[in-house]
Each structure stands twice: as structure tokens, then as C-alpha cells.
Image (tube, helix red, strand yellow):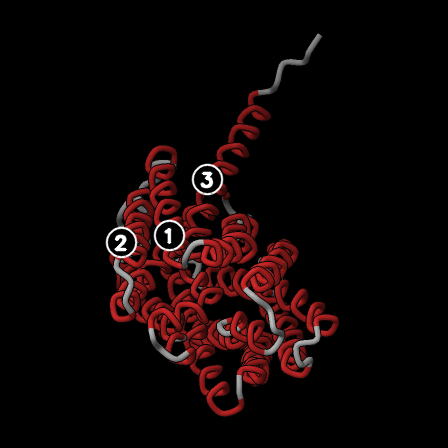
Amino acid sequence: MNAVPRPQATSAIAASASHAGVAAMLAFATAVAVATEFLVVGLLPGMARDLGVPIASAGALVSGFALSAALFGAPLTLLVARLAPHRVLVAVLLCFAAGNLAIAWLPGYPLVLAVRVVEGASLPVLISVGSAAAARLAGPGQAGRAVARVYVGVVAALALAVPAGVLLADRVDWRASFAVLALAAAAAATWLAAAFPRLGASTPGPVRAQTAILRRGRFQAHLLLSTCLTAATFAAYTYLAAWLETVAGYGNTGIAAVLAAFGAMGIAGNWIAGRLAERGTVTASIGVALLLAPILAGLSLTGGNPLLFAPLLAFWGMAQAAVLLLCQVRTMLAAPTAPAFAAALNLSACNLGIAVGAVASGWTIAQFGVGAIGFAGTALALCAFAVAAALRSAASG
């Protein structure tokens, strides 16, 4: 005779299934948003040629998106804090759908840049509200793993969506890649509108109480660490496609394959970081900074030799995924009274880091050529190590 399931066990199974469904929705939405941000990295050489701008100037399509996220993401998240999460998420996804469709239909450098700025402001809202909702549903002590499941979307975007967009651009046109992203954003909005749990507003407290976290020196240091870590890894990643084309001699198919392998390694990095996220995130950040410094320097020293740069790219892919997750969870845990706002501030700091990294690499390229992009990242990784070491020292002092 089959045993009758106990009510508690049935409830636990149902809750687990519900959390899995929410995680899948949020991961898909995150993948669309992150692919929108970083698809340009894989398409940068072709977009620069078609839009009639130098490669260093085309980097503004990356840095402009990132700077907009840095400047406007947190204030927008604060404004929508009292709205139901599903309404916010659907509205932001529709914004991405409209923006990507505009890029596909009306290409031109000023318009593309303007759309990227609007989308950049929307990205922190999507990821911070989604991460906070996932943490609420998961319950106490599970925030790190819950956010890690959402960040599977980041890994999927880097491992699958960006390389697929590069291949589609090679077979059709880069505009077609943005048209597909517009459809994906619309599909994600429809899915969330139909199935996302109708959570109430998180009641984060008055605006003054939330913004009070910005006056804490330790929290400011956490944001600085996020900026330095992302600046380090994205200083090289922003121009990775250009490096692969110019230094390693790869065509679009080869670039797509390398980007896919790079992103796939993020699966391991995301898994490892998810298990470290709630215990010793500062120490883990120190480890990642120390790993990035020699990897990025080594990238510029390989001269495009695949036997030398392949293992470096593999470890770099793991480290980059770990950076993104560790920064998000670390800042959310540092401000438990306002996790969504803290998450948005972290994303603003990270996007500021992406912009700083892109600018640093653009300057490096102008002075020393594309082959030197790794050295800018190494210098920034050492800055991140110094900030993280100071944070750990202050905590133990």
C-alpha cells in the first residue's frame, strides 16, 4: 500500500515547485535583460562599421548603458518600491521589448545610444526587484541560493544568448539579433504577467530610512568594492570580441564559440559563489580579485595563442560569474532593512564599474592597441583586492 503523504511534506514539495517556477521566470527575464546589455560586446566591431564610428567610440554603447544604470537605477527602484513586484517586472520587460524593437527598425548611432541609455536605467530595477522577491519567497537563510538561481539568467545570457546573437548577426544582420531580443522580452513579460506570484509591496519603510544605508561607511565600501571588481573584469570583457578578431584572428563564428565557452564556465562560477554567498563574501571577493589579476595580465601576454589563452578564458569566465553574484548578495546582506534598494545600489555600482572598465580599456586601446586590454583589468583587480582587504580588516578589528 502506498503511504499517504504527510501534509507537511506535501506543502514543502509544493513550495519547492513554486520557488522553482519563480526562479525560472526570473532567470529568463534576467537573461533577456543581461543579453540586451552585453550583446553589443559581441557585435561591437560590426556595429561600429555599420554605424560609422570608431571602435573606441562604439564602446559608448556599452558604457552609456552602464552609466545610465549607475545613475538612475537606484532612484527608479526607490520610486517603485511600494508597487507590487509583478507589475514592476512586467513594465520593465515591456520597456526592453520596445527599445530593442526600435534599435532593430530605426538603426542610427544617436538613436541606438539613446535607447541604450533608457534600457540601462531599467536594468537595475528588474534585477533588484526580482532578486528581492526571490529572497522573500525563499525565506530566512536562503537568500544566497535564491539569488544564485535568479543569476542563472546572467550565465545563460553570457553563455547562450550573446553567442547566439553574434551567430545570427553573422548569418543575417545585427539588427535581427535585437529583433529577437525584443520578442524574448515580450514573451518574458507575458509569462510574468500570467504566472508570477501576486506579492504585495515589500513595505521597505520610508525613503529616508532606506537611503540611510548610504551614510554608513562600511556600506559605501561594499559599493566601492562592487565597482572595482566589475571594472576589473569588464575592462577586458567589453573589448573581448575586438581582441579575438584583431589579436587572435577569429571570425564571427569563432568569436561566438569562444563567448559561449566563456559564458558556460560561468555556470561553475555561479554555483560555487552561490554556496559561498552567505558566509565570507568579503573573503571570497578577495580570492576572486587575486584570481583576476594574473588571468587578465596573462590574456594580454598570450599574443592570441589559443593554447595559452583558452585556460585563462575558462577561469576568467568562472570568476566573472562569481563577481556578479557575490557583489549582489554581499550588498543585500549588508543592508537587511532595505534589500531591494541595496541590490539596486549594487547594480548601479557594478554598472559604474562596467563604464569605468570600458573607459579604461578604451584609453588603453588608444595608447597601446587592443592587445593590451588585460593590463587595465589587472590594475583594477588590484584596486579591488585593496578595498576588500580593508573591509575584512575593519570587520575583524
Residue 316 position, x and y percent, is: 63, 68
Q: Which mark is residue 129?
A: 1
Q: Residue at x 32, y 60 (%)?
A: 119
Q: Which mark is residue 80?
A: 2
The answer to whether residue 56 is visible is yes
- Please tell me whether mark 2 or mark 3 is closer to you in this view: 3
- Identify the mark nearer the N-term, 1 or 2: 2
- The reply to whether dot 1 and dot 2 touch (C-beta < 8 Å) is yes
Q: Which mark is residue 22?
A: 3
**Marks 1 and 3, how far apart at CA:** 13 Å
Badge 1: few (under 14), some or many (20 or more) residues near its Cα, within 10 Å? many
Give the amino acid at mark 1: Val
The relative height of residue 16 versus residue 309 in the rendered view (above or below) is above
Residue toward you, 2 or 252: 252
Secondary structure beneath dot 2 equals loop
Quadrant where the N terminus lies? top right
**Marks 2 and 3, how far apart at CA:** 20 Å
Give the amino acid at mark 2: Val
